[in-house]
Structure formats: structure tokens, C-alpha cells
Amino acid sequence: MRLPLSSTLRMGAYVAKNALFPRPEWQRDPSPRNSPFPILPEGRQRAAGSQPHPMLRKRFPLVLMLEPLHACNLTCTGCGRIREYEDTITTKLELEQCLAAIDECRAPVVSICGGEPLMYKPIGRLVEGAIRRKRHIYLCTNGMFIEARLHEFRPHKQFFFNVHLDGLRETHDLAVERDGVFDEAIAGIRAAKAAGHMVCTNTTVYRETDMREVEALFEYLRQFDVDGHMLSPAYGYSAVQSREIFLTREDIQEKFKDVDSLFRRFRMNTTPIYAEFLKGARDMPCTAWGNPTYNTRGWKGPCYLITDAHWDSFEELMSETPWDRYGRGNDDRCEHCMVHCGYEPSAALGVNSRLADSLRMLRWALT
């Protein structure tokens, strides 16, 4: 199975409950007069007679993007965190703040990211606290500190090490701007698997990415019995100045046109519906509210990549963010974004779904 049965059932029950009984205060759109987002353009008018998908008016979180720190031992070309949060790079959340955010948000999945989360001193206790709260956890890491800190974690069906690999040795080391990182990440994967942990990988596709190399990377990882692969296109947001490495929407569709072959050969954690969106076979609206971000400055709005405000509470993020003023066609910054944190929730919630989608998602989840 893609996830443990208990996690799959818990996620299904959570989605059904929130779809049937959504929090009304999370569904309203604040008055522009009260909005802290004055730089946003006015949203474009919908076509006459068109109505938004009903799930777009049933907002609730699916995955909490938890960033206990932004410090990192690498300076990856495509990473905006070490640049956007340069003046607070040494700031860290207290363990109690992290656990309180998990309780406040109540999302069934927690992605612990950053920065490099294995540089966070109480990371073992944070993971253990999330497990006690019955969350499904992905610890997103460059893999270099796995061996050194592995003794702080116990294997659990709700916990994955999610190791970032952008290609084979030469390509990955070039992307992270340091030689030897690929080999250290592989050593971390081997150690985690030997200790009984679940491990998946996360690969970002850039303009120069050769998709044949991505396929070769997944083939290489077979020998370590890796438990799954995530795949997402790079998005050129304002905190990163190297625009030439990023993809337009047309570039993304060209890169992912043969993505079905990866699904046939490998254990992909990317959903097949999102994969269809990437290759241009369907369109979906962004549902960034499904993946809220909490970090050292608070609840980041509106999404993981664009920062227009930091809220003190999750309630404020959900009820005061003018969600209808974001997304393609509403905000120029969203025009070429197709990243998983904005569109995987749309796939999971069945936005713009087709008749056979439920069966495909079920088959994907159970294999």
C-alpha cells in the first residue's frame, strides 16, 4: 500500500468529515478594506454563468508544512528560504511551538521541512510528539545528517525520511552547490533502511533537468528498496533570483509529457491525477489552503512559496486570507506555478474530477 491502512482510513475519514461539515469561518472571503494584501490586483471576473467547484468553498488543511528553522548546511540554487529569511536565519521555534501548531492546524499529515530539520536539536522529540498525535510525518532532509542522528528516531509506520535528490551524483551535487552531497544522502538512505525506517525521495525538476536522468535515478534507488518518490516542477518565486533555471507552464507540460512511464515502473507518491495536470491533460485550480505553512514568523500566507503576510494564528490565516484573489488568472505571480503544495490538494479533493478518478486514486493508494 502507498500508506499504512490506518493512515489511509484516517485521511479518508478526515476529508469526508470536513467536506460535509466545513468550518464556516474558513470559507468566507474578507473585505478588501480589511485585507493586509494591498499589493494584489483585483481578481478577474468569472465567465458568465460559471460556478466554482463546490470543494473550493470547503477549505480545510490536509498537510501542515512545519518549518522549525530556516538554517541549512547547504545553499541550493533553487531554495528561497535561506534568502527570504536571511535576517532570521538563526531563529528557531521551540518544541512546544511546533507541537502547538500541529494541534492548532489539525492536518492529518505533517511535512517537517526548513531549512534542514536535522539541524533542529529536538527533532527526535518533535517527530515522536507528532506520532503520538496520530499524524503521518514526512521529515524532508538533504540526508547528510541521517546517520549522525538516526539513533533519535524509532521506526514507525507513520514516519518517513523524505530525502531530496535532484538527479544522479554529478547533477545533484551541482544543484546543491557542494561535492559529495549525493554520496552522503545515499549513505543516509542506506542507514535509515537498514534501521527499519521508511524512506522516500523528493525530486525537483528544473529547466535543465533531463527526465531520462530522473528515470535513471529511480532505477538506481531500487537497490535500496526506497518506499516511494515525489516529483514536482521548480517554480520561480520572488525569493529566488536565478530565473533561468525555472520553468514556464508550457515547459512543465513538455517535461512531464511522458510521466506515465514513471508511474508504470516505479512507486510514485505523486498522485496520478496531479501527474495528468503536470502533463497538461487536465486543468485544476490551486488549493494552497490545503498545505498551510508555519515557521519562525508565524503562519505564512498565502502559500508555501508566496509570502504576503505572517499571521499569529491558524484561524487568522484561514479566515483573513483573500484566497479568491490568488491562483492563475488572479495573481500574476501564480501564472506558471504547478507545484505539488498548491495542486496535490486539488487532486486529493477531486476538484475537476472525472468519472474514473475515484477508482484510479483508490488503485494508486492500495498498490
Image (spheres, grey):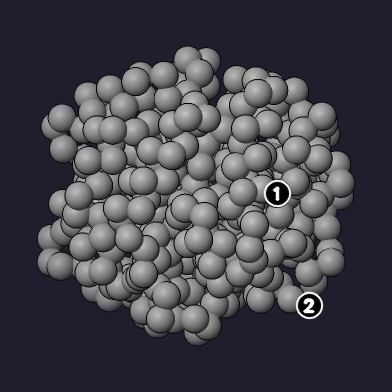
Q: Secondary structure at mark 1?
A: loop
Please state the horizontal and vertical placement of residue 128, each as a whole percent of the image: 77, 28
State which quarter of the image contains the N terminus. top left
Give the residue number, with chain letter if any, for mark 1: 144
Residue at mark 2: 87
Helix, strand or loop for disc 2 = helix
* Vertical order, 252 against 8 (above or below): below
Q: Classify 333 as above or below 112.
A: below
The mark that comes first in sequence, 1 or 2, is 2
Quarter of the image for residue 86 reads: bottom right
Query: Residue 301: which disc?
Result: none
Q: CA distance from mark 1 to mark 2?
A: 25 Å
Residue at the image point whose x is 25% and y is 47% from the top: 259
| Front-lying residue, 42 or 241 | 241
Q: Is 158 on the left-hand or right-hand side of 8?
A: right
Percent across and percent down for residue 164 are 55, 50
- Taking depth in this image into account, of 262 and 281 the one nearest to the observer is 262
